[in-house]
Image (tube, rainbow, N blue to C red):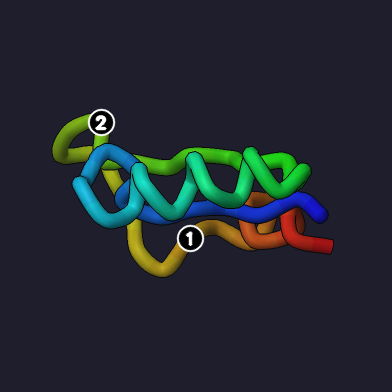
């Protein structure tokens, strides 16, 4: 399964991402890159989970 982890640079989120990968999931890590972050995520980003 393809899973997006929001805030993947944090302690808890990075551990969750590692565990998911170890269990065979494809993990997409998302983390703030600067002041250009928009929330809610644009529709084209949200389709990654489908």
Which residue does the numbered mark 1 point to in the structure image? 41
Q: From this view, report whether residue 40 is shown above or below residue 14.
A: below
Mark 1, secondary structure of its residue: loop
Quick check: marks 2 and 1 in contact, CB under 8 Å?
A: no
**Image spot of residue 37 (x, y percent):** 29, 46
Q: Residues within 10 Å of mark 1 (few under 14, many from 20)?
A: few
From the viewer's perspective, tell me whether residue 33 is left or right of residue 49: left
Indicate which disc residue 26 carries: none
Q: Give the residue drawn at x 35%, y 43%.
A: 14
Rounded to the nearest angstrom, the CA distance separating label 2 from label 1 is 14 Å
Q: Give the residue drawn at x 31%, y 51%.
A: 7
Q: Give the residue drawn at x 48%, y 53%.
A: 5
**Image spot of residue 32 (x, y percent):** 25, 40
**Image spot of residue 25 (x, y percent):** 74, 47
From the viewer's perspective, tell me whether residue 24 is left or right of residue 29: right
Which residue is at the far top? 33
Q: Give the residue drawn at x 27%, y 38%.
A: 9
Q: From this view, report whether residue 32 is shown above or below residue 12.
A: above
**Image spot of residue 49 (x, y percent):** 74, 60
Which residue does the numbered mark 2 point to in the structure image? 33
Quadrant of the snapshot with the C terminus: bottom right
In the picture, residue 31 is in which quadrant? top left
Tally of numbered tags? 2
Work out whether mark 2 precedes mark 1 in sequence or the reverse, and give the earlier one. 2
Quadrant of the snapshot with the N terminus: bottom right
From the viewer's perspective, tell me whether residue 36 is left or right of residue 49: left
């Amino acid at each position: 399964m393809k899973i997006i982890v929001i805030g993947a640079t944090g302690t808890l989120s990075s551990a969750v991402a590692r565990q998911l990968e170890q269990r065979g999931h494809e993990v997409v890590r998302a983390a703030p890159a600067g002041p250009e972050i928009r929330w809610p995520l644009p529709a084209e980003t949200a389709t990654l989970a489908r």
